[in-house]
Image (cartoon, grey):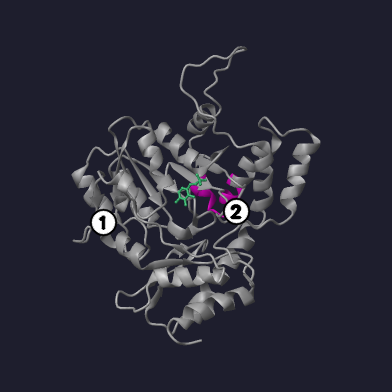
Amino acid sequence: MEKNRIYLSSPTMNGLEQQYIQEAFDTNWIAPLGPNVNEFEKEFVSYLASKEPTESFENGLYSTALVSGTAAIHLALKAVGIKKGDVVFCSSLTFAASCNPIVYEGGVPVFIDSEEDSWNMDPKALRKAFKKYPNAKAVIVVNLYGTPAKLDEIASICREHNVVLIEDAAESLGARYKGIQTGTFGKYGIFSFNGNKIITTSGGGMLVSDDQSMIDKARFWATQAREIASHYEHEEIGYNYRMSNVLAGIGRGQLKSLDEFIERKKKIYYTYKEALKDIEDIRFNPIPEDCQPNYWLTCITLKDTSKVKPIDILITLENNNIEARPIWKPMHMQPVFADCDFISMVDDPKGISGKIFECGVCLPSDIKNTDEDMGRIIRIVKGFWGSR
Ligand SMILES: *Cc1c(COP(=O)(O)O)cnc(C)c1O
């Protein structure tokens, strides 16, 4: 193909990562856990805390670095004590990693529909779900594509029902709701550093909580549940979930660029919005009041009546060597979760989330997109409406 590939969201290294990795090599601290892991955990929570009114962390904030965001959700559910048959509510419009760990523990996912105004978990549907399942044990709320859910309302519903909130902030690192960092609203927050997230360690995750003893416990489970003894002593089942010292070095470097990356992602969102504003069929992923997203991905939806369909845009972009993606297919529409319940405020089995899926496209939102790349993408999209 004649033109360079444009990516949806690929890793962007700033050079500092290499220095931290070099340190790990110089000290032969390739393994086991080491200074980069400890420092990355500290620097990560200081990043979150530095942006906060201090009173929101009166107990402090603690973290453990893991192999993935999925592992972080798994350990959060273990920390809550989810057992066979326990109901856990989870946003339906998300990636399967949000809810797979519920099943690892024998729990029963019940999916909650989205609201129009944020695409995230509808607090009204969550209330309705508690009426049907008053014994639910936990709620997993996702901040989709980097836009916060109505986190204070959802947190307060959880408090009313005495249920633990786990915030899946895998896509929303650095985003804020009412000025407060996402990932800090629930008892547990999880983050991902997978390859296409806003910062990456090639693969990795973080679990945070204000409960130091539970973070210590999660770290213990993540290192094979090895008891303190001179021999190998095990009283519980453990996991091999800790982040390596080399990868934590990448994370330390990446974290230094996070604010800049958010600015660049924001610029991408508003560039698309401005360029496509005259096309009435196109709407953008909404940004409600009180939200300061990290703009991880810019998404559009097309009106039902539009002659252009998402698949047309996806195929044409691909033919031009440009990577775009459909919106996540909601969990309640996935064959593997066909038996799970779905709670919605609308009278349509697809729900609002299913409609967003059917009419949506994630546009290339790579930090390295040049003005020329943006122009190329925009020209192709506009071309469908005959306006280049
Ligand atoms: C990426 C992602 C995860 C999983 O993170 P991994 O690090 O890939 O395991 C979980 N939830 C959401 C919403 C994600 O986008």
Quadrant in which the N terminus is drawn: bottom right
Callout 1, which amino acid?
Lys
Of the residues under marks 1 and 2, which one precedes in the sequence?
A: 1
The magenta span reads: 45-57
Query: Left or right of 60: which side holds 253?
Result: right
Label 2, secondary structure: give it: loop
Q: Could you tell me which secondary element the residue under label 1 belongs to?
A: helix
Is 56 part of what is drawn in magenta? yes
In the rendering, at what x and y percent does residue 332 appear? 29, 51
* Residue 11 place in picture, x, y as percent: 62, 56
Task: Please say whether residue 272 is one of the residues in the magenta stretch.
Answer: no
- Nearer-the-camera pick, 375 or 217: 375
Q: Amino acid at mark 2?
A: Ile
Front one among 375 and 59:
375
The location of residue 183, given as percent across then percent down, is 48, 49
Say which residue label 2 marks.
199
In the image, farthest residue toward the right: 26
Residue 124, numbered label: 1
Residue at image location 22% in from the left, 41% down from the top: 134
Visible residue check, residue 168: yes
